[in-house]
Amino acid sequence: MATLETAESDDAIIRSGLASFVNWILVLGLIYLLICAVGLTGSGFKSATGGHAKELFAFATNPFLGLIIGTVATALIQSSSTVTSIIVGLVAGGLPVATAVPMVMGANIGTTITNTIVSLGHVRDKEEFRRAFAAATVHDYFNVLSVLIFLPLEIYFGILEKAGYIFAEIMVGGESMSVKSFNYVKAATAPVVGSAKEFSHILPAPFDGVSLIVLGIALIFVTIIFIGKLLKSLMIGRAKAILHTAIGRGPVAGISSGTLVTVLVQSSSTTTSLMVPLAGAGVFGLREVYPFTLGANIGTCVTALLAATAVTGDNAVFALQIALIHLIYNTAGVLVIYGLPFLRVLPIYGAEWLARIGSERKLYALAYILGVFFVFPGVCLFISQMNS
Amino acid sequence: MTTEVRSMSTEDLVQMIDETEHSLLELKMELRRRRQAQQHAEIERLDEHLANAKITLGGLKLFFQTVLDELRGGSKTS
């Protein structure tokens, strides 16, 4: 009897190990597809615009419009990783980096809608709702504050664009560390991207390029969703260990654990939404959740960075530049806002105030969501169109 | 209490403050330990929390129903 039980247990271990192995192979396959998808989007965009991407996106040169595009696109798709990966693909196809920077900033704001909507589910209990809504909106306040600080600096001095270019050139453009170090990616993705390009030529121009863009974006969507699903099941043990280690160790450990968990599950929305029910139940306080959500901002940059490695050719440096700008922007945001005590408390005060009035009257919470993510961007869009 | 304190010697008062501070510190540490134990316990249920950290139609419906109730003037939430 005991021997039978041992054999069954051994079988279960083998089955679980095999399932895990298969899932890892699938993750690697999906990452490969994601890299190919960004390559396809870039090639398609280049082909469809015939080298006139700059003129095509001339309407978005207004940085506020770029910000709105990034915000609304991410709020609708609910994945900043997907939007930034698409932006990397568009930059690879000729979209100017300066136009793409506000879009990336907007993606940060747009992604915060997910955990805010998740917090609405706690509406049954007023106190629980107040805690959950504050935990969700502290991320919104932080990201809006970050834009308020860095967008003017970017408009007037181009600091992020310059910093991103310096790092990107070191990585792919310089002579000491040339693009050769990334050539293995090109070699690996060339058959798929090349075949798709060849196949697309059965359509007349510019539909061949458009078909590649559609295919690339669809693949980015699907791969990021499935990578997230698979990694969630594969990395749950590791994520638990990271979170256990961070408990009671202060904000730096909170930021680091938020970063690592987001890298593991490949979704900042998942990481920040995870904290909402925990905060709602009162297990974690707002000040404990806050640094963790900031880590999510940094961790989410990995997907776009990975996607940027797919890009080759003249625009490789720019694709990597925009991915690095996202990372630099989010890291600098944490260093500046969380590093300076007088700025650090602003998102907390804002979130506490909004949660207080929102829990008293839910209409305020609804008005906030619709206002920040849709009405305000819509009004800005309308005004900018009227002025142009 | 005030009369008792006034009648105490300064040394006794200092000792009493020390003991109270020590007790307070111990109580705070116990509270912190309990809170962290609760956090560790919740993290053990991470898979469950991950599954719940999603936008649900039911949650949204309930929220909109609450907003409508509030607009009609009869808040149903506590």
Image (cartoon, helix red, strand yellow):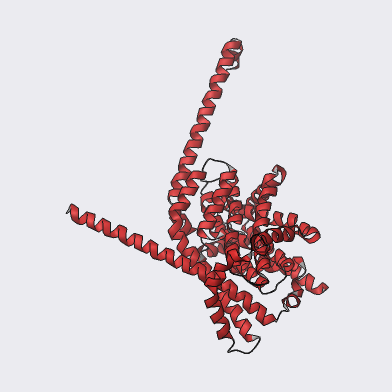
- Front residue of A164 and A377: A164
Number of residue marks: 0
Quadrant hosting residue A79: bottom right
Q: Is residue B62 visible?
A: yes
- Front residue of A221 and A175: A175
Q: Can residue A120 be seen in this view?
A: no
- Front residue of A374 and A211: A211
Residue at the left extreme?
A: A1
Where does residue A220 sit, x and y in percent of width and height? 56, 71
Quadrant hosting residue A59: bottom right
Residue at the front extreme?
A: A176
Assign the C terminus of chain A to one quadrant of the image. Answer: bottom right
Residue at the spot x=56%, y=51% of the render?
Answer: A258
Where does residue A207 sit, x and y in percent of width and height? 63, 86
Quadrant hosting residue A153: bottom right
Residue at the right extreme?
A: A387
Q: In this view, does A83 lie to the left or right of A223?
A: right
Where does residue A341 sit, x and y in percent of width and height? 69, 42
Assign the N terminus of chain A to one quadrant of the image. Answer: bottom left
Residue B18 in the image: above or below residue B8: below
Residue at the spot x=81%, y=74% of the render?
Answer: A386
Residue at the spot x=62%, y=71% of the render?
Answer: A312
Residue A143 in the image: above or below residue B29: below
Q: In this view, does A230 lie to the left or right of A262?
A: left
Where does residue A205 sit, x and y in percent of width and height? 65, 87
